[in-house]
């Protein structure tokens, strides 16, 4: 699986080419394709001078989610080279499903088994999003596979540019520690939340630091010391996470 | 030094596409239509030109949820865009609509078009409303056909473009 490969390496060795398609959302993402016709979404698509470490955040969050078994699509870093005009340090996100719609489109038509399944995901992600200080969760950042299945639901949570150092380094004001549960509007499963909080608490410090440290230092260059801030916050927040989730 | 202030404005058009397989680029991408937004000092407007329908082969390549929506795009997407337009600050409707559709159904990044000089200079708001509506329909239709060119098997038809304006009180220059 792509996630198995991308979660164990930081920077892509594939050849990626922009196709010319762009989206108009915050980080100005653009479509890229590799030699195997894999479609990726690369971001940021321009030099955005807000010091947000978008690419590093996307990569670290995706890798952390992977080891916890949470539904965040795989991400790989792409250095566009010194000659590139714009932000050369980008991240490429893979699409989790061949066909997907945003949560707010799907929600009204969900069947009861899908709502129950969504509660489990919301519970798990509530713990995860609180741990990583996810600042920008909303329905349009929750994708649901459009596969015709009605007794289960496949969900992917995307767009974690605004997390980790975004608040921890003061780029944005700190929000309350407890983050809302997404997908929203269905409630959340408390046991699923507890389970992920336990798993986060048990994550080895070495593993966390390895995931952060393998991101090249250039991806943190907009904020001095931010790499250490990300590592230390992730490590220290493990033990207080359950208090915030109460 | 004499400095004259020319009124400014913004006209942006974005393409709407359905990706039949988000994971691969060697798969079909189905054009759905174009949407636009105008923001002038005294008037704001949005417009859409969607395909009226899709052929059976195209519908078969869509997921069931989006197939239902795109069986008649204007019936679902126009009211949604209009609702956003009614509630948002001037000039943001297209961006907010695009934020809601960035997966299989994607609103791509908008392109700015030149504002017709007449739009900037017309002082009669009733007349302005009329010329913006008429010109927007032409622009949307033109952009729609550029997007769909070459013509498709089922013929290059378009729903009658829908445009809505909202006049704001003229600000004294």
Image (cartoon, coloured by chain):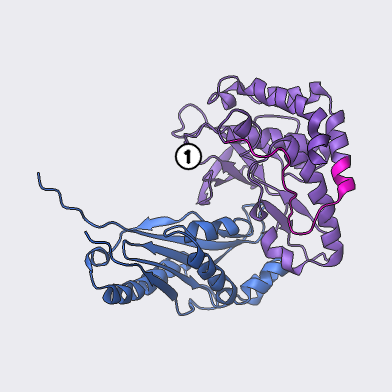
Q: Residue at x 66, y 33 (%)?
A: A164
Q: Position of residue A23 (x, y in %)?
A: 53, 51
Q: In front here: A81 or A124?
A: A124
Neighbor class of circle 1 (other Cα within 10 Å; few <14, some 14-19, many 20+) is some
Q: Colour of chain A?
A: purple
* Left or right of A205 in this view: B11: left
Asked whether residue A51 is drawn in magenta, I would say: no
- Residue denoted by label 1: A46
Q: In front here: B57 or A137?
A: A137
Q: Residue at x 67, y 55 (%)?
A: A139
Q: Chain of mark 1?
A: A
Type of secondary structure dominating the magenta stretch: loop
- Which quadrant of the rendered structure holds the N terminus of chain A? top right
The secondary element bearing badge 1 is classed as: loop
The answer to whether any part of residue A18 appears in the image is yes
Q: Position of residue B93 (x, y in %)?
A: 48, 61
> Against A127, is B161 above or below?
below
Which chain wears blue? B
Magenta residues, start to end: A173-194
> Against B51, is A170 above or below?
above
* Left or right of A98 in this view: B138: left
> Against B8, is A238 above or below?
above
Q: In front here: B161 or B5?
A: B5
Q: Position of residue B86 (x, y in %)?
A: 49, 67
């Amino acid at each position: 699986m792509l996630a198995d490969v991308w979660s164990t390496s930081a920077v892509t060795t594939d050849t990626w080419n922009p196709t010319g398609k762009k989206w108009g959302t915050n980080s100005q993402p653009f479509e890229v394709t590799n030699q195997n016709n894999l479609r990726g979404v690369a971001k940021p698509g321009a030099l955005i001078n807000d010091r947000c470490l978008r690419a590093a955040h996307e990569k670290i969050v995706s890798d952390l989610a992977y080891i916890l078994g949470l539904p965040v699509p795989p991400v790989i870093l792409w250095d566009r080279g010194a000659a590139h005009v714009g932000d050369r340090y980008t991240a490429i996100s893979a699409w989790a499903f061949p066909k997907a719609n945003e949560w707010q489109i799907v929600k009204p038509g969900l069947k009861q088994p899908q709502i129950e399944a969504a509660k489990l995901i919301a519970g798990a992600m509530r713990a995860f999003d609180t741990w990583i200080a996810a600042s920008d969760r909303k329905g349009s950042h929750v994708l649901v596979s459009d596969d015709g299945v009605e007794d289960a639901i496949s969900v992917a949570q995307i767009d974690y540019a605004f997390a980790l150092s975004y608040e921890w380094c003061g780029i944005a004001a700190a929000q309350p520690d407890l983050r809302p549960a997404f997908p929203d509007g269905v409630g959340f499963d408390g046991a699923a939340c507890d389970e992920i909080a336990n798993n986060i608490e048990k994550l080895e410090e070495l593993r966390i630091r390895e995931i952060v440290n393998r991101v090249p230092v250039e991806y943190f260059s907009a904020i001095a010391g931010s790499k250490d801030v990300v590592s230390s916050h992730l490590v220290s927040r493990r033990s207080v996470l359950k208090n915030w989730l109460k | 030094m004499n400095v004259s202030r020319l009124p400014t404005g913004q006209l942006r058009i974005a393409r709407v596409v359905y990706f039949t397989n988000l994971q691969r680029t060697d798969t079909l991408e189905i054009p759905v239509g174009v949407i636009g937004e105008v923001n002038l000092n005294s008037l704001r407007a949005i417009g859409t030109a969607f395909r009226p329908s899709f052929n059976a082969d195209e519908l078969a390549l869509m997921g069931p949820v989006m197939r239902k929506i795109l069986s008649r795009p204007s019936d679902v997407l126009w009211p949604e865009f209009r609702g956003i337009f009614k509630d948002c600050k001037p000039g943001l409707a297209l961006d907010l609509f695009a934020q809601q559709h960035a997966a299989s159904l994607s609103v791509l990044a908008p392109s700015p078009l030149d504002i017709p000089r007449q739009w900037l200079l017309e002082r009669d708001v009733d007349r302005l409303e009329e010329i913006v509506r008429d010109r927007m329909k032409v622009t949307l239709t033109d952009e729609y056909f550029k997007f769909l060119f070459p013509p498709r098997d089922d013929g290059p038809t378009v729903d009658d473009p829908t445009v809505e304006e909202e006049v704001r009180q003229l600000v004294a220059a």
